[in-house]
Image (cartoon, rainbow, N blue to C red):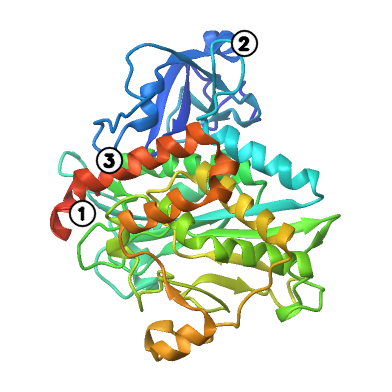
Amino acid sequence: MQDMSESADGDRGPRVVALSWVDNAGISRVKAVPAHRLEHANRWGVGMAPVFDTFLVDDSRAGGPGFDSPVGDLRLRPDLTRLTLLAAQPGWAWAPADRYGQDGTPYAGCQRSFALRMTREAQARGIGLRMGFETEWTVEEDPRARATPAGRSGPGPAYGLARLAGSGPYLLDIAQALADQRIDLLQIHPEYETGQYEVSTAPESPVDAADTAVLVRHTLRALSARHGLLPSFAPLTTPSGAGNGGHLHLSPWRAGTNLLQGGGGPYGMTPDGEAFLAGVLDSLPALTALGCPSPASYLRLVPSQWAGAYQCWGRENREAALRLVTGGHAAPGTANAEVKCFDQAANPYLLVGAVIAAGLAGVDAGLRLPPECTGDPAAAPPATLARRGVRRLPDTLAASTGHLEESALLRRAMGDRLIDAVLAVRRGEEALLGGRTPEEIVEATRWRY
């Protein structure tokens, strides 16, 4: 927990604390309390309605049996171990919140509680997970801004050094704010498209990684506003663009040893490390409904765009949905896997919890990885893909939702309340946006995440 006595710019402690949670449509929601009421909120919680379980991206509701009643209440309780002064918003602090029933028991539909429960299940089997998210976003000039934007990237090459001439002050402010908030920044740089950037943070425990992803995005929103910019974390911001990914990096550990190194399996993986990744790979069609939760996601998830559109794995293969990063001899302990197919519309707590569940199922079954994919699957003959067991991931939200609905593994892990709410939201998003043109889908979602 960050010291609350003084903020980064010398002001005294926070006056208001934002308590946030992420809903099943991937939208971060908030209730805020005065700082002097934080202890009361920690003890008794802050009221919020259960109907948020089926809110859609446009704030309408999918509803459904058990989810559309105006009666009932839950309690938001902050996790004060993550209480953080917001460097870009003096006077404000932030804490992630868990949802409880009025009787004080954890709410079965709480996504963050699900992630914590799965983390503990892994720990009970002697497996610790280290995870981290990449955050990609795209900015445009805010027409409401009075000042000339200082963070304007301007046209230029993908990843081009020239783009730092305009965006250097913006990225410098981001790096400083993240440091002030005790976030370990690994990389920050211009990305592929004009006005697009990426932040990568250090690996943490699964729940901490999801918390950090939420905090990073809010920090980027606040600093973008200071620089006269509008940020978008949507899967696509233009119908023809590459889009914003939300890649998840992970590594399983036991007794201080990285299970993706030092073994006799492919590229030195141990049997349990390989089995964990095989479990994740096996469940990817269902996991796609959690990591690619919008019709807009499937405009991004296309072959030959480094989006990971095929259910396969490969060492440093950026077209595989599961990319193995071996780390090399110069970086012992850094081997990890990157799940590339996910995007920024996803709820990070749902993702880390479900990925752990899939990985543990792989360990329990002693799964082994199929043959490695060494090139772009889209360029391989269909017979070769079939022989290697390589399949295209679902290309519509309806298809991935069907895989999630059929997954007994994820229903057991998530529980009926949580998975039924997620399924209701996915069907609702498909009904809301599924019949629209790509241009209409992009326009409807680009400023929502």
Query: How many residues crowd mark 3 within 10 Å: few (<14), some (14–19), many (20+)?
Result: many
Residue at 67 percent of width and 75 percent of height: 326
Nearer to the camera, 245 or 196? 245
In the image, residue 144 above or below residue 141: above
Q: Which residue is mark 1?
A: 442
Q: Which mark is residue 43?
A: 2
Residue at 60 percent of width and 15 percent of height: 42
Q: Secondary structure at mark 2?
A: helix
Which quarter of the figure has residue 243? bottom left
N-terminal label among 2 and 1: 2
Nearer to the camera, 243 or 280? 280
Question: Could you tell me residue 444's position as x and y percent?
Answer: 19, 46
Q: Amino acid at mark 1?
A: Val
The answer for how far apart the CA atoms under marks 2 and 1 are is 42 Å
Question: Could you tell me residue 71's position as x and y percent?
Answer: 36, 11
Q: Amino acid at mark 3?
A: Gly
The answer for how far apart the CA atoms under marks 3 and 1 are is 17 Å
Nearer to the camera, 82 or 342? 342
Circles 2 and 3, Cβ within 8 Å, touching? The answer is no
